[in-house]
Amino acid sequence: MTRQTPTQRLRAFIASESAGGIVLIVAAAIALVIANSALLAGYQSLLATPVNFTAGELVSIDKPLLLWINDGLMALFFFLIGLEVKREIVTGQLQSWKQASLPVFAAVGGMVIPALVFVAINAGSPDNIRGWAIPAATDIAFALGLLALLGSRVPVALKALLLAIAIIDDIGAIAIIALFYTENMNVGALALALVPAAGMLLLNRAGVARTIPYFLLGVFLWVCVLKSGVHATLAGVVTAMFVPIATGDEQPLERLEHALHPWVAFMILPIFAFANAGVSFAGAGLEALFAPLSLGIAAGLVVGKQIGVFGACWLAAKTKLASMPPEVTWRHIYGLSCLAGIGFTMSLFIGGLAFIDPDQIDAVKMGVLVGSLISAVIGMTVLATAPRAATRPLNEVPSA
């Protein structure tokens, strides 16, 4: 396989994520239609279908179909995220501070401010505070899918910036899940997880380029992590860290990325969206949206992301801690900060970890869907009316 240049990889990734984002939108729309039709009972029954896997007396996993999707299929999504993060840090946009500084500031602002907005709105509702991380996420597939609809009106540099922000955002989400959404830890199972991890380390040190051994040990690791109480999807991230970028003429990490992208973009994420976006609006009025939990999420995504991402970029440029991409105006940056408020996949995922009460989960879905929709409409409107070429050098900070 001919090795691609970083620019070619970036363009191929954006094209794949953009098309996948459109499929994701369709899957979410179908789930919403079903959930608000006579098919709702069948939809809920399907997701509650028990699925059991047993391997002798050693392993027995019995979960409803919804949790197999969220714990199993999504582990492959997190595995792909891990591959992307490793590549970007070692050879891509995040390998130097000069390249990574702006997306780092933007991503941090885009996580901290939405969380603060959520906490401020839910300060009087202690049962909801556990959902503080829900509006901190950004859905890269959805956002890039919408950017694709704007074609050449959006500079490639802006898409690259959004991609880098989302990757750093994913790193933050992974850390949040590991630190704040792990309970009742089984130390024995976690200790056993060190065995496949050590095996993958030895494979890496030995320069093994074949990916099957990593996959088999990764499955073993997933089972151990699932039984430990740590969320099983993190096993995907850990496995990705051991896959070598290059071994001689082989490029195992890049090969895996190319192989996994279509499956994640066109199957795994749409299935997740179909299984998690179905919320019934029957009997739900404005009071449901303005309840603290759903309002905190929606406001965090719409208001918090705009303030956090745009404000961080503005401050970074003003203090000369970061430089802006070429051919990008401040209107582009503002539109990007709005699109960063599309939390969808990761927000719904974190919401499922934060709450088990059905009413709270429905409130999470409503807040995520409404907040993401408003963010998408504002962002698309701003970018659709933005100039095609920069009218101002972005190291020139606009007046307040």
Image: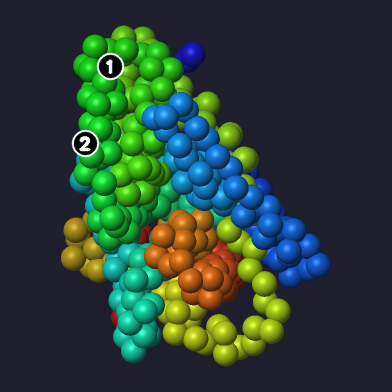
Point out the tag, 2 or 1, that comes first from the N-terminus.
Answer: 2
**Quadrant hosting residue 319:** bottom left
In the displayed structure, 321 sits above or below 203; it is: below
Type of amino acid under label 1: Leu
Q: Residue furthest top?
A: 248
Label 1 environment density (alpha carbons within 10 Å; few <14, some 14–19, many ≥20): some
Q: Nearer the viewer, mark 2 or mark 1?
A: 2
In the picture, measured across the screen, residue 84 lies left or right of residue 21, that is left
Decide if residue 347 is in sight here. Answer: no
Tell me residue 242's x, y (percent). Answer: 29, 27
Q: Residue furthest right?
A: 38
Give the camera-side residue of 389 and 257: 257
The residue tagged 2 is: 191
Give the camera-side residue of 359 and 172: 359
Please name the residue shown 63% across and 54% down the image.
47
Please name the residue shown 58% across and 43% down the image.
51
Residue 203 - label: 1
Type of amino acid under label 2: Ala
Label 2 environment density (alpha carbons within 10 Å; few <14, some 14–19, many ≥20): few
Residue 378 - label: none
Query: Helix or strand or loop: what does disc 2 sit on?
Result: helix
Decide if residue 65 is in sight here. Answer: yes
Please name the residue shown 33% across and 36% down the image.
224
Give the camera-side residue of 364 and 29: 364
In the picture, measured across the screen, residue 283 lies left or right of residue 86, that is right
Tell me residue 241's x, y (percent). Answer: 30, 32
Tell me residue 185's x, y (percent). Answer: 26, 51
Q: How is the image coloured?
A: rainbow
